[in-house]
Image (cartoon, grey):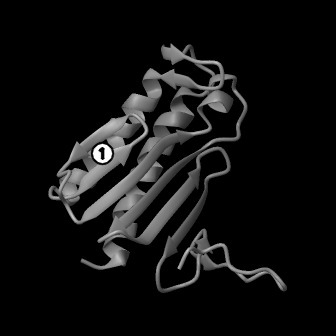
Amino acid sequence: MSSSSLLSVALEAAHAAGQLQRENLGSDLAVNEMLQYDIKLDLDVRCQTLITDIILKNFPDHAVLGEEGNAGNPDGTTQWIVDPIDGTVNFFYGIPHFCVSIGVKVNGELVAGVIYDPNQDETWAVEKAPPPRSMAKPSAPVPGRKSATPW
């Protein structure tokens, strides 16, 4: 299994969840829990379920660790880390600054990740080997700045 196949599934899942978010932005939202600094929406659960279904359809032996719960094989060597609506409070208040965040670890090592902003239809994808890219274009390093990539 290559990081490219993992990244391909992460992209599919992030874009599917982003579409669901776009369809629901500004609508009446069911609130599962409201805390001082956090809101748990039914849409969070629906987005994570959609992401989890896509991941486990392709990789049934993997684990999915999500903000809304875990699924799949907890003993698997591949773990997907999911925040289905990264910025739920913004989403709830109709502030268009939120995204879908998905990362993948294999044997404890981060190998791929996707951040998808459904409002701008902008995708950031990273694999361990090639440089990060936005909209499938390599990103240029900023002079004088160390890479933010953890590997």
Front residue (pair 122, 62) = 62
Across and down, in percent, residue 101 comes to: 51, 51
For image coordinates 33% across by 40% down, the residue present is: 50
Front residue (pair 96, 41) = 41
Location of residue 21 with respect to 134 vertically, above or below? above
Q: How many marks?
A: 1
- The image quadrant where one finds the N terminus is bottom left
Left/right of residue 104 with respect to residue 131 in the rendered view? left
Left/right of residue 95 with respect to residue 137 in the rendered view? right
For image coordinates 39% across by 57% down, the residue present is: 12
Callout 1: SS:
helix
Residue located beneath label 1 in the image: 52
For image coordinates 39% across by 34% down, the residue present is: 68
Of all residues, the one furthest to the right in this rendering is 144
Local packing at callout 1 (Cα closer than 10 Å; few below 14, some 14-19, many 20+) is: many
Location of residue 84 with respect to 106 vertically, above or below? above
Front residue (pair 59, 28) = 59
Type of residue at label 1?
A: Thr
Location of residue 108 with respect to 103 vertically, above or below? below
Across and down, in percent, residue 2 comes to: 30, 79
For image coordinates 65% across by 19% down, the residue present is: 36
Across and down, in percent, residue 96 comes to: 70, 37
Left/right of residue 122 with respect to residue 69 in the rendered view? right
